[in-house]
Every structure is written in structure tokens, then in C-alpha cells.
Image (tube, rainbow, N blue to C red):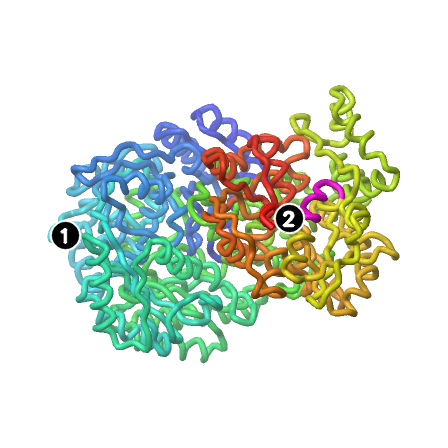
């Protein structure tokens, strides 16, 4: 591009939307969820149709390509481009109208599917297609790819659900597409009518294929098919025009649903059975095998499963339909679930497969590329056997899953896309698999479109004559060839523009061990494949956490887990982000990461942005002055120990409470002026425990545990420690203090969260020396603060991977509830018998799990569920200057509303010091640790 400044200037002048040619904006949009990477010139966030039209006119004049983008979850590369990316999710994301009587809705292209479903649900309606990315994919993207989803056996593809489309072509002209030729660009009708024989014969072999998504659906323009321009346009992948508004059809949602999970010996048996279930009228027939299912999933016996959903006017009717399917199916075992929560939990297993499939059982990487071929359902069993044979022939592995009832298979394959030989094998396999799919009467794409991944091989499916017609159709709609060029028509080669090409081939020198990624930071960053579960706009129900900063910032991709991973990818690539570890763009994107660790568990592929952030901050500030908050809060354990040693807690508290002095201290410490400084305890937990005559435990024959004196319990909330001692002793457990003759112990959490990894490792090495006698004695270590327990469990062994005692200590760590459950299984806790509200600590959710806590609460009569999400304080994050508004927004998402709606007598639980502090400062109610609640009732 010769005149980039002129392009940017003219775009800003011509329309009202956002124009961003920054390094950050370009880096965020280099990739979608495919194997491909193309660097754009800039990003446009239009406000309305006029903005899009004006931008198209400018880009046509400059000869700049344009690619429309929604959620960026496309798996074939069609949501990437080298020109201008038009992001519809920022402003053009509305539901314009919903007509329950007509069962239609008018939507803008950036509307997320779940928002449409939520609006339609009160009327007993829904949009039929529902990809597994329904919580973040957009209607515009679904139209572009002709998306389907698990309910396609009942309600078809997006093309089956579109009534009319408002489209802008590359010259800025508006077209209203429906049935009939009205709205078609000049020359299209004449072209199609000249080629009627080619169209009829070219598409005839695929007439009975429910998931034929590949190529242009020119056969929808045949007179015998009603000349349906809207249907034709679905699946054109942004190559013919940009949708600015769509009228879609809604279907009646069954008032009740049931889910039958059918167990089979293997995937071939499940595939053979799928087509036979269709006459029973199921809503879904989804399949997956055992290698994609986590342990303890609760599925019935088998090596592969079909997820068959049924509907009915009543719960009994839906359940009866599911029971009939179980009786009709030849299964090893079966499970029928009627309650909605149980169904959601099972569906989550299937929906997360798009991420979990990116890792083979041994942890090696697997990639899309042949993600969604489709064959006639009756051919699925033979096709899968041949597919497996082809994998073996090429020395590859993959795990098929997907829409068995429609003959559509998703699979991630362990392609080596990092070496020349591996890429060559990727091409050979692709060519052979295309031939195999066609031999079974199938379509190269059954859901996600052709994009760059498959379009090069379309002649194998349709032949050169029909593919040539696709090119002439493209020229009628887009004579300037600026709309997503290189996609679908005259495509780039399938082995070009691979996302991994610019990454370093040698491991990057890092501090953390990254054991799940072979010690390779590049491999850790590659975990993000773009499925974008982190981009969910609302936390919704359940206990999920990821990604609070994305939601708090109104859906800014920069502050999503995926966005940060993209910037780290580009930092390693060095083409767009050129400053390496010193990059201010990466630093600023990571600044609003709360280090909540939610992505570590909620991301289907286990992206651990908290660790990546700590790694980056370590290198970014290495040898340089750090922000004041890193010294004040990152080294908090050191300052609190100094206060305790000098017995100046009262003085510190007094000075902090004096307005001008407190304000000055906060400014010097990089602390948000809106925050109150927590008061330091005058007597530490350990000192109080000793002075009470119980520092050595009460003795007895019960199991002995070391009670970890974490910084927060020790210096800021010693009452939690004293309560825990009382409860543990009541349960017959003997809590013992950690020996401190060799110095204090610390989990290093505050050092890690601020990226002071040299300091963290020094602290942890000292801690391991101090803990030597405890480890030698084999005693469990009970940690009351969830964030400290999580740091010991995960950060400790990753920071000291060559230190055997690091893993030993990590494995000894127990939470308070785990200690009671494992060491005193017969103990009966005191009954509280009250409702409970609050929040599970985000680090506990991500690293430790809360199953033991749930069981303990149940046994104590604490009724109700704690909310998910993050409190927003997140250790030092919410105290740092510049973070207050985001911190409050995170708390307002779920925690504060839950607490405000609680009754006066309800128990507010918050095991984490940060959570309790946030509640006290923003919610006006004191949260308590579970140990305190139980101790009160002893």
C-alpha cells in the first residue's frame, strides 16, 4: 500500500465509525480460528450502513481489499485479510425488530447469536442453527459461512432460516435480496440463465446432501428452486457483498427438552447408528469419542457417544421421546437427563470439543484444516473407517466428533505446520482427503465454509467448469475484486499464509517451566486457537470466570484472553509488534488482565494468561524501573513483616486514616485514590496463636497438619486463622505451626502477579528450605487463602521445575475444606442452616476446584450456590491506580448484585481476602471465610 496515510485520512473523513490503523488493532486481527494469518492495514468499526458504504467506496478507489468480521471464530481463514477489516461487533450489533406473530427478527450483522436467542425465548421461539460458538459468534458471520450447529437435523442451516438480506456490494450499492431476481446485481440473471445446464448437472450429485456448504449455492437461483437470492448469498464468505441487515426466520422452541446420551463401543458404531435415529424426529444427533471426554464426565459406559435431544410440550413428553430413542437404539449403555442444569453440563462437554480437540491425549498439538467435511448420513460409518485409514497412511492422528446425524465430522489433526516437510505432508493429506470425501458423495465443507483451507480443492468436488462459473459470479458482484480476495474464488494455496510461519523455531528463554508445552513459550502462546470462549459478553449462569476484563470493557477484544494471546503471538513473530518484550502494545493489553486465572480452567485449550502476563512483565521491566505498585504491593509480604517486627501496626493504620497522609501514601505507592487501605492487624495470627497457648496444637492422636501462615491471614485477617484452628481441632485434626527458625515462608503470589519472578523464585527457594522438616515428616499443608494455595499448587512447581521439593510441597497443599474431607471424613460439621451468597474465589475455581467446599457447605446446611466470575479486586489489580473502574465493573457483574439481593440473615461467604475486601469497600457487607462461619457454630 503506497499511500497508507491517505487511506486512513479518507476513511476518517468519509464515515463516522472508528478507524484504527494502530499496531494493536492490526495485531488483534491477523488471525481467526483457523491455521491462517494475514496482516491487515487497519480496522473499521462502522456505526451504520452508510459508514460501510462510504468505506467500500474509499477502499475501491484505493484498490484495498475489504473483509467483514464478526466474532472471528471462522475456522477456514475467511475472517482474515490484508486490507481493511470491517468489525461489525462494536456498533452494528443490534436486534432491530422481533415479530413473534410472523416468527421473524431483523438483526444487524454484529449481533451475537445468544442475544437473539434470549430475546426470542420469552415468545417460545428461537433461531434454529446454533454452532457451538453460539455465545460469541455473530449472525453476520453465520450468514457468511452458512453455519449450522447441533440442531440442524431439525431446523437446517442458516440458509434455511434467512428470509431477506440487505447487502452492500463493493461499489457501495445497496441490494435487498429475497426470493426472485429483484435486488440482483446487473448481469447475474443473464449469466445464470446462460449456464442453467452447467448448474443443474454440477450440483445434481449433491442434491440429497444436507450439509453441502462448499462453493456458491448457484443452484438456489434455479427457477425450480424459487430463485432464492437470500439463500444463494448465505455461505459466500464475504466475497460478494457485506450484509448490513438481515431478516431471519424463527422456529418454535419445544417447551421442554430431554437429552439421551447413548453409549457405543467406538465412533464407527456410533456413526453407523446415527442415521437410523433420524426417523424418530430428534432435535440433535451429535457424536464424540472418549478421547475428547474429560475424566469423571458422568457419561454412560462406552467408547463413543451420541447426544440425542428430544422435545415435547411437557417434560414428560420430552422424556418419553428420549426413552423411545433409547429403546430403538442398539447401545451398550444410555443415560436420559431431563433437568436443564444436567443437560447444560453434558452439552458443555460437546461444545468444548472445538477447543479440547486441539490437544491430543499425549498433549501434542492438533490443528484444523479439514475441520468439517460432510457426507450423506448413511455413508458416515464407511467414510469414518476410510478416513481413519487415510490418517494412518499419512502418519497422522485426529479425533473426529460432530454432527453425526447430518454426516458432518469435525476433527483436529496433529499436522506439523512448523517445518517444510510437515507442511508438505499437510498438502498431500488435504488433496487425498478431498478425493476421499468426493468419493463418498460428500462436501469439502459441511459447516464452516471453504475459506483458504479448502477452496483450492473445489475443482475436485465440482469440476473446473462449475468452479469457473463461481469466478464469473464473483466478477458480476465484485468487479473490483476487493471483497475478501483469495477466499473461495481464485483462492490462495492452502499451504500459504500459515499462522506459524513467522514464529521463532528455537524455544524462547523464559522463567516459568511451561511443563504442558515442553518448556516452549511459543507453544504455550499457540494454545490459543481462536475459538473465543473468552469473548462471551455476559457471565450468564454457572460458575465460569473467563474473561472479566473483556466484559468490563464492553467487549474490547484487546482485553480478552484471545486478544492478549494474539498480541503475544505477534510479539514473537516480530512483524507487526516489533519491540519484543519491551512492547508497549502488549504491556497495555495485559494491564487490564486481572490475573484471575479463569482462562486456565475455562478456556477449552487451557490458555493461562495470568502466567503469560507474569512472564511478560518480568522481561519487560528487567533492568528497568518498575511501576510504584510493583514495589508497594508486589513486595507486600516484606513490608507487612517489617511492620510486625517493629510493632508499628497502630501507627501505620493511623497514618493511613489521616486524609492528606493517606492520599500521599497512595499516590507514592501507585494505589488508586478511591481505595481504602486495609488495616494491619496489631497482633499477627501466629503471635496470637502462640500467646493463646495453642501454638503447638492441642495434641491428641488425630492427623497432624501444618497450617500455612499466608500473608493475608497472618497480617490482615488473623481471625480467619484462629477460626480455622478451632474447627480443625474440633474435627480431631491437629494443626501445627510452620517452623520459622530459618525464616518466614511465602507462596510468592504478589511477586508473581507483578512479574518479579527473580524475587518470587528467591522467596520460594527460601520457603522450601524452611518447609524441609514438614515435607520430611509427610504432613499435609493446609492453606486458608485460596490464591496462596493456588500459587503453591501451580506457580511453585512451574517456577522451580528442577527442584523436586517444589512438586512435593505442591502436592501436599490442601484447602480448608479438603483437609476436613480427607483427614476427618466422619466428622459432622455444625449445622448453620442458612442461605448462602458470595463468590467462589477465581483462583480456587481455576486451580483448586471447589467440590470439597460444596460438599462441606451442604453438610453444614448452607443452602444455595455461590456465584462465578471475579470480584474484581484480584489481589493487587483492583488497588492499582487506573484500575478502579474496571475493578468495580467486574464486581457489579455478579458478586455485588447477588449480595444486594440477599436476605439480612443470609451468610455472605468469601474465602479470599480480596473478595472480602471488595465486598467491604463496595458492597457494604462483610464477607466471611467458611472457617469463621463454622467456628461460630461450634
- Magenta residues span 715-723
Q: Position of residue 532 (x, y in %)?
A: 47, 49
Residue 665 occupies which quadrant of the picture?
top right
Direction from residue 918 to residue 49 in the image, left or right: left
Would you place residue 23 above or below residue 489 in this image?
above
Residue contact at pointers 2 and 1, CB within 8 angstroms: no
In the image, what residue occupies the spot 23% across and 40% down? Answer: 123
Residue bearing the label numbered 1: 225
Does dot 2 land on a helix, a strand or a loop? helix
Magenta span: chief secondary structure: helix
Nearest the eye: 563 or 740: 740
Nearest the eye: 915 or 872: 915
Does dot 1 land on a helix, a strand or a loop? helix
**Sooner in the amino-acid sequence: mark 2 or mark 1:** 1
| Furthest residue in direction top, as rendered | 660
Would you place residue 110 above or below residue 329 in this image?
above
Q: Position of residue 106 (x, y in %)?
A: 26, 36
Would you place residue 281 above or below residue 865 in this image?
below
Q: Position of residue 582 (x, y in %)?
A: 72, 43
Is residue 8 in view? yes
Residue bearing the label numbered 2: 571
> Is 122 colored magenta in this rendering?
no
Nearest the eye: 160 or 461: 160
In the image, what residue occupies the spot 40% across and 77% down? Answer: 388
Nearest the eye: 854 or 420: 854
Q: Position of residue 779 (x, y in %)?
A: 73, 66
Direction from residue 535 to residue 872 in the image, left or right: right
Is residue 185 in view? no
Amino acid at each position: 500500500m503506497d499511500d497508507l496515510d491517505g487511506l486512513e485520512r479518507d476513511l476518517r473523513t468519509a464515515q463516522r465509525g472508528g478507524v484504527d490503523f494502530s499496531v494493536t488493532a492490526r495485531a488483534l486481527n491477523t488471525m481467526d480460528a483457523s491455521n491462517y494469518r494475514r496482516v491487515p492495514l487497519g480496522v473499521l468499526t462502522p456505526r451504520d450502513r452508510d459508514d460501510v458504504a462510504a468505506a467500500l467506496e474509499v477502499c475501491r478507489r484505493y484498490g484495498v481489499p475489504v473483509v467483514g468480521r464478526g466474532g472471528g471464530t471462522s475456522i477456514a481463514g475467511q475472517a482474515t485479510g490484508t486490507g481493511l477489516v470491517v468489525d461489525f461487533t462494536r456498533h452494528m450489533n443490534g436486534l432491530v425488530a422481533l415479530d413473534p406473530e410472523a416468527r421473524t427478527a431483523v438483526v444487524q450483522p454484529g449481533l451475537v447469536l445468544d442475544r437473539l436467542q434470549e430475546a426470542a425465548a420469552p415468545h417460545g421461539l428461537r433461531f434454529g442453527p446454533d454452532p457451538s460458538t453460539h455465545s460469541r459468534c455473530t449472525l453476520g458471520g453465520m450468514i457468511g459461512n452458512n453455519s449450522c450447529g447441533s440442531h440442524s437435523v431439525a431446523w437446517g442451516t442458516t440458509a434455511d432460516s434467512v428470509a431477506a438480506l440487505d447487502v452492500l456490494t463493493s461499489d457501495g450499492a445497496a441490494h435487498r435480496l429475497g426470493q426472485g431476481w429483484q435486488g440482483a446485481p446487473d448481469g447475474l440473471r443473464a449469466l445464470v440463465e446462460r449456464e442453467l445446464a452447467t448448474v443443474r448437472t454440477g450440483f445434481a450429485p449433491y442434491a440429497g446432501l444436507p450439509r453441502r456448504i462448499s462453493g456458491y449455492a448457484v443452484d438456489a437461483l434455479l427457477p425450480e428452486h424459487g430463485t432464492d437470492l437470500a439463500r444463494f448469498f448465505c455461505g459466500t464468505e464475504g466475497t460478494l457483498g457485506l450484509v448490513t441487515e438481515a431478516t431471519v426466520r424463527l422456529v418454535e422452541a419445544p417447551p421442554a427438552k430431554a437429552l439421551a446420551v447413548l453409549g457405543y463401543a467406538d465412533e464407527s458404531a456410533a456413526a453407523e447408528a446415527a442415521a437410523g435415529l433420524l426417523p424418530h424426529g430428534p432435535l440433535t444427533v451429535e457424536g464424540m469419542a472418549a478421547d475428547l471426554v474429560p475424566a469423571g464426565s458422568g457419561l454412560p459406559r462406552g467408547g463413543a457417544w451420541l447426544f440425542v435431544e428430544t422435545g415435547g410440550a411437557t417434560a414428560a413428553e420430552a422424556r418419553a421421546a428420549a426413552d423411545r430413542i433409547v429403546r430403538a437404539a442398539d447401545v451398550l449403555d444410555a443415560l436420559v437427563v431431563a433437568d436443564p442444569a444436567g443437560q447444560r453440563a453434558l452439552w458443555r462437554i460437546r461444545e468444548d470439543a472445538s477447543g479440547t480437540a486441539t490437544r491430543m491425549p499425549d498433549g501434542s498439538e492438533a490443528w484444523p484444516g479439514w475441520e468439517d467435511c460432510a457426507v450423506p448420513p448413511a455413508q458416515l460409518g464407511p467414510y469414518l473407517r476410510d478416513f481413519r485409514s487415510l490418517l494412518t497412511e499419512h502418519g497422522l492422528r485426529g479425533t473426529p466428533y460432530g454432527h453425526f446425524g447430518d454426516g458432518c465430522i469435525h476433527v483436529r489433526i496433529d499436522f506439523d505446520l512448523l517445518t517444510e516437510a510437515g507442511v508438505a505432508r499437510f498438502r498431500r493429506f488435504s488433496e487425498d482427503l478431498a478425493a476421499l470425501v468426493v468419493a463418498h458423495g460428500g462436501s469439502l465443507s459441511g459447516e464452516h465454509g471453504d475459506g483458504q483451507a479448502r477452496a483450492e480443492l473445489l475443482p475436485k468436488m465440482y469440476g473446473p467448469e462449475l468452479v469457473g462459473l463461481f469466478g464469473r459470479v464473483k466478477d458480476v458482484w465484485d468487479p473490483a475484486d476487493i471483497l475478501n480476495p483469495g477466499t473461495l474464488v481464485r483462492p490462495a494455496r492452502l499451504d500459504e499464509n500459515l499462522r506459524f510461519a513467522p514464529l521463532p523455531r528455537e524455544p524462547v528463554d523464559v522463567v516459568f517451566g511451561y511443563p504442558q508445552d515442553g518448556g516452549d513459550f511459543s507453544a504455550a502462546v499457540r494454545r490459543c486457537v481462536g475459538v473465543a470462549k473468552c469473548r462471551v459478553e455476559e457471565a450468564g449462569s454457572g460458575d465460569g470466570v473467563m474473561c472479566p476484563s473483556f466484559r468490563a470493557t464492553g467487549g474490547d477484544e484487546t482485553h480478552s484472553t484471545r486478544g492478549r494471546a494474539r498480541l503475544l503471538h505477534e510479539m514473537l513473530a516480530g512483524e507487526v509488534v516489533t519491540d519484543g518484550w519491551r512492547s508497549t502494545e502488549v504491556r497495555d493489553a495485559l494491564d487490564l488482565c486481572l490475573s484471575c486465572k479463569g482462562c486456565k480452567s475455562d478456556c477449552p485449550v487451557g490458555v493461562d494468561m495470568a502466567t503469560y502476563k507474569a512472564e511478560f512483565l518480568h522481561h519487560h521491566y528487567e533492568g528497568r524501573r518498575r511501576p510504584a505498585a510493583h514495589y508497594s504491593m508486589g513486595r507486600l509480604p516484606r513490608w507487612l513483616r517489617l511492620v510486625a517486627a517493629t510493632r508499628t501496626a497502630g501507627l501505620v493504620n493511623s497514618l493511613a486514616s489521616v486524609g492528606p497522609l493517606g492520599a500521599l501514601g497512595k499516590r507514592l505507592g501507585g494505589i488508586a485514590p478511591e481505595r481504602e487501605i486495609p488495616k494491619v492487624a496489631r497482633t499477627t495470627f501466629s503471635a496470637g496463636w502462640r500467646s493463646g497457648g495453642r501454638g503447638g496444637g492441642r495434641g491428641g492422636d488425630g492427623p497432624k497438619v501444618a497450617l500455612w501462615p499466608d500473608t493475608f491471614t497472618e497480617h490482615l485477617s488473623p481471625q480467619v486463622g484462629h477460626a480455622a484452628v478451632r474447627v480443625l481441632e474440633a474435627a480431631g485434626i491437629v494443626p501445627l505451626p510452620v517452623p520459622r527458625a530459618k525464616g518466614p515462608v511465602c507462596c510468592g503470589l504478589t511477586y508473581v502477579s507483578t512479574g518479579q519472578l527473580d524475587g518470587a523464585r528467591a522467596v520460594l527457594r527460601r520457603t522450601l528450605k524452611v518447609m524441609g522438616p514438614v515435607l520430611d515428616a509427610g504432613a499435609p499443608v493446609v492453606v486458608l487463602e485460596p490464591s496462596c494455595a493456588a500459587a503453591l499448587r501451580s506457580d511453585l512447581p512451574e517456577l522451580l521445575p528442577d527442584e523436586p521439593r517444589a512438586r512435593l510441597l505442591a502436592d501436599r497443599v490442601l484447602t480448608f475444606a479438603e483437609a476436613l474431607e480427607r483427614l476427618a471424613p466422619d466428622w459432622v460439621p455444625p449445622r448453620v442452616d442458612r442461605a448462602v451468597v458470595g463468590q467462589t474465589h477465581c483462583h480456587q475455581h481455576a486451580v483448586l476446584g471447589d467440590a470439597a467446599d460444596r460438599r462441606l457447605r451442604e453438610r453444614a446446611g448452607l443452602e444455595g450456590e455461590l456465584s462465578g466470575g471475579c470480584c474484581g479486586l484480584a489481589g493487587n489489580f483492583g488497588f492499582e491506580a487506573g484500575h478502579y473502574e474496571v475493578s468495580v465493573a467486574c464486581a457489579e457483574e455478579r458478586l455485588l448484585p447477588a449480595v444486594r439481593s440477599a436476605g439480612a440473615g443470609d451468610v455472605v461467604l468469601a474465602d479470599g481476602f480480596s473478595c472480602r475486601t471488595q465486598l467491604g469497600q463496595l458492597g457494604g457487607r462483610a464477607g466471611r471465610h467458611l472457617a469463621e462461619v463454622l467456628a461460630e457454630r461450634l
